[in-house]
Image (cartoon, rainbow, N blue to C red):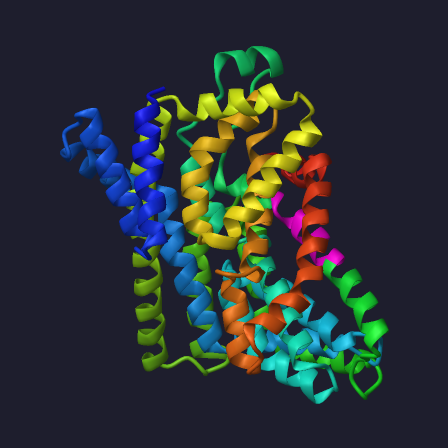
């Protein structure tokens, strides 16, 4: 490994980030500087960029974004939240617990943390405030629960992780020591994310109960009513069926994640136009505009992050980092602590998708050297980066919740800190017990 190359690559990247350059510019310019130092033809940069967006699985990215935008416009998300709200009851922390459940439900059709926070927060933060909850707490529990949007499948970061990891193979030494590793696929990641997402939601609910009991926050003024739950479920039947159709098709092998995204689009169009009759042409055009903007933003990062990662891999940087970490300790539990701590710090300062594309080529070889399953590692990575949505200074969910609740970022951040700690504990449990993530894919035959 060339030490000067690492200094040029990371030094240029760090400098541009400090001066406020967009992440795409920082990645692209630092990669170009490294290629200039190596004497590579700049046309190689164009070739690598083109290859990064030529994969069939990447088609799922804009498709899931469009499906989520259409579901919001068609009223599916509102009906899912209404079902969750009827489950609040008069119990301690009932409405805030319903907020966590609403984020869990919406995450199954959204795939995005900020989108989940915005959709749920618009309805649940005012509802919690009317029930006597402090607006700061209402905003913090929504921001923390919004991170479930990228853990519960379908998940846009899982698509990006799958694409970033597909070209990385374990070293012969790792295969000799631990045997053959399973291949990375987006379908496996989707299936593996279900139980970890439920565990993190369960930890959030436990934290919420303890804090609400201390603060005296209760649920709704009305008693829990089975008839109201059934009525809301009846009205939202087609909304509830959306994640069933998407995930059921993937889990049973009827279609791939990319095909599932297309099915989700047509399902939403049918429900929104024919059944609910809330989706019109103007909303469809707005959804397409949102999809174009978000997908374009992600693809620009993907262009440059692919080159950045390829330079690291071709020059042996991940192997050196893996060797360095393994020289510190041979304990898998300590390695997990180091990996999770690094990801928590990165998540505070870097957008989730960019962090995945930069760090997967660096950290997945470390996982292979420790005998960690790549699917398990991907789930831990995505779960850990999801906490970055609720931690400053980047904290996209914090900004959204702050705008909805009119509460300062500082107050929401302090109130969200216990949720972040709870999430980190849950992630370490997922890391130490791989079967939480790997049991379901094996049961369904993946």
Judged left or right of residue 227, residue 18 is: left
- Residue 169 seen anywhere in this rendered image of the structure: no
What residue is shown at x 36% (from left), y 19% (from top)?
1
Q: Is residue 193 magenta?
A: yes
Whether residue 103 is in magenta: the answer is no
Camera-side residue: 327 or 295? Answer: 327
Q: Is residue 218 above or below residue 374?
A: below
Image location (x, y in percent) of residue 93: 79, 74
Q: Is residue 296 left or right of residue 91?
A: left
Percent coordinates x, y for residue 69 in the rendering:
43, 69
Q: Is residue 208 left or right of residue 173?
A: right
Foreground pick, 362 / 376 = 362
Q: Nearer the viewer, residue 280 or 384?
A: 384
- Give the dominant element type of the magenta stretch: helix, strand or loop: helix
Image quadrant assignment for residue 81: bottom right
Q: Quadrant of the C terminus?
A: top right
Quadrant hosting residue 212: bottom right
Q: Is residue 227 above or below residue 54?
A: below
**In front of the other: 439 or 394:** 394
For residue 192, say whether it is visible.
yes
Residue 55, image x and y in percent? 33, 40
Q: Tell me where residue 436 appears, x and y as whole percent.
A: 71, 40
Q: How many marks?
A: 0
Residues shaded magenta: 192-203
Q: Residue at x 53, y 56 (%)?
A: 246
Residue drawn at (21%, 28%) of the image: 37
């Amino acid at each position: 490994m060339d030490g000067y190359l690492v200094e040029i690559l990371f030094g240029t990247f760090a400098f541009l980030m400090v001066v406020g350059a967009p992440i795409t510019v920082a990645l692209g310019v630092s990669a170009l500087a490294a290629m200039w130092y190596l004497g590579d033809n700049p046309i190689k940069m164009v070739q690598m960029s083109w290859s990064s967006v030529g994969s069939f699985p990447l088609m799922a990215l804009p498709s899931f974004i469009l499906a989520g935008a259409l579901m919001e416009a068609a009223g599916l998300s509102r009906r899912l939240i209404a079902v969750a709200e009827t489950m609040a009851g008069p119990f301690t922390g009932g409405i805030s617990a319903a907020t966590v459940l609403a984020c869990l439900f919406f995450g199954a059709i959204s795939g995005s943390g900020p989108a989940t926070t915005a959709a749920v927060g618009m309805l649940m933060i005012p509802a919690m405030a009317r029930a006597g909850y402090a607006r700061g707490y209402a905003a913090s529990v929504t921001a923390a629960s919004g991170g479930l949007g990228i853990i519960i499948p379908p998940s846009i970061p899982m698509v990006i992780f799958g694409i970033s990891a597909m070209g990385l193979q374990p070293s012969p030494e790792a295969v000799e020591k631990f045997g053959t590793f399973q291949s990375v696929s987006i379908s496996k990641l989707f299936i593996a994310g279900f139980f970890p997402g439920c565990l993190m939601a369960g930890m959030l609910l436990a934290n919420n109960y303890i804090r609400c009991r201390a603060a005296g926050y209760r649920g709704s003024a009305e008693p829990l009513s089975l008839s109201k739950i059934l009525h809301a479920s009846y009205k939202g039947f087609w909304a509830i069926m959306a994640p069933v159709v998407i995930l059921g098709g993937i889990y049973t092998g009827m279609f791939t994640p990319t095909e599932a995204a297309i099915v989700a689009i047509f399902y939403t169009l049918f429900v929104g136009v024919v059944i609910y009759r809330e989706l019109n042409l103007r909303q469809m055009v707005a959804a397409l505009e949102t999809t174009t903007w978000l997908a374009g933003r992600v693809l620009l990062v993907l262009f440059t992050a692919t080159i950045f990662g390829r330079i690291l891999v071709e020059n042996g940087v991940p192997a050196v980092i893996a060797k360095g970490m393994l020289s510190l300790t041979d304990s898998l539990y300590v390695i997990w602590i180091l990996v999770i701590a690094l990801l928590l710090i990165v998540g505070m300062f870097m957008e989730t998708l960019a962090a995945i594309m930069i760090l997967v080529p660096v950290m997945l070889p470390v996982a292979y050297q420790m005998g960690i399953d790549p699917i398990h590692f991907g789930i831990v990575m995505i779960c850990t980066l999801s906490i970055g949505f609720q931690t400053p200074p980047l904290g996209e969910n914090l900004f959204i919740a702050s705008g909805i609740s009119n509460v300062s970022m500082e107050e929401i951040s302090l109130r969200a800190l216990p949720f972040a700690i709870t999430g980190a504990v849950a992630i370490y449990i997922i890391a130490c017990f791989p079967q939480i993530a790997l049991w379901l894919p094996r049961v369904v035959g993946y």
